[in-house]
Image (cartoon, rainbow, N blue to C red):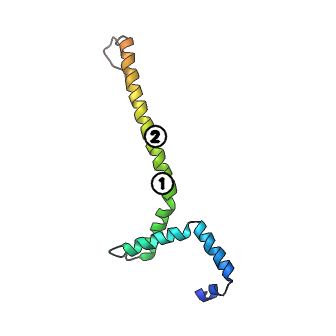
């Protein structure tokens, strides 16, 4: 079995490089966030490991989720603008076009 004592036997500079690597990759912040969230839970989950796994999955999705949410908001705004433009153009066209003889309306 490999223990923490085994890892401590390595050089300090390698451990420091690895720590910087984890910080730069966002691993330290993600783990800290998950552990703080677990600590702050009033009722601790029965399966702490599963909780951590689920939270890490959620943390890993945030950049994509934020980008997708931004895109969704922009597309909704564009859709609203286009719907309003379409409504305006239909109204303007209605004034220039005779009504269909069969009484049907086009939409």
Question: How busy is the neighbourhood of tag 1: few (under 14 within 10 Å), some, or many (20 plus)?
Answer: few
Rendered image quadrant of residue 39: bottom left
Q: Position of residue 77 (x, y in %)?
A: 42, 38
Mark 2 nearby-residue class (10 Å; few <14, some 14–19, many ≥20) = few
Quadrant of the image containing the C terminus: top left
**Residue found 50% across the figure and 50% down from its top:** 67
Q: Find residue 14 and report its image quarter.
A: bottom right
Give the residue displayed 43% in from the left and 72% down from the top: 36
| Left or right, 95 with reference to 59 | left
Query: Circle 1 is placed at which residue position?
Result: 65
Instruction: Answer with left or right where residue 103 lies relative to residue 33.
Output: left
**Residue 50 can be seen in this image:** no
Residue found 38% across the figure and 17% down from its top = 92
Between the C-alphas of marks 2 and 1, the distance is 15 Å
Q: Earlier in the sequence, mark 2 or mark 1?
A: 1
Residue 18, image x, y percentages: 64, 74
Residue topped by disc 2: 75
**Outermost residue, left direction?**
103
Q: Count numbered badges in the picture.
A: 2
Q: Secondary structure at mark 1?
A: helix
């Amino acid at each position: 079995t490999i223990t923490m004592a085994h890892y401590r036997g390595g050089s300090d500079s390698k451990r420091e490089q690895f720590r910087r690597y984890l910080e730069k990759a966002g691993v330290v912040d993600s783990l800290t966030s998950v552990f703080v969230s677990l600590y702050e839970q009033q009722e601790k989950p029965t399966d702490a490991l599963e909780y951590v796994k689920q939270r890490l999955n959620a943390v890993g999705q945030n950049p994509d989720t934020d980008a997708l949410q931004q895109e969704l908001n922009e597309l909704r705004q564009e859709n609203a603008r286009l719907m309003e433009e379409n409504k305006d153009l239909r109204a303007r066209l209605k004034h220039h076009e005779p009504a269909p003889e069969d009484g049907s309306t086009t939409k």
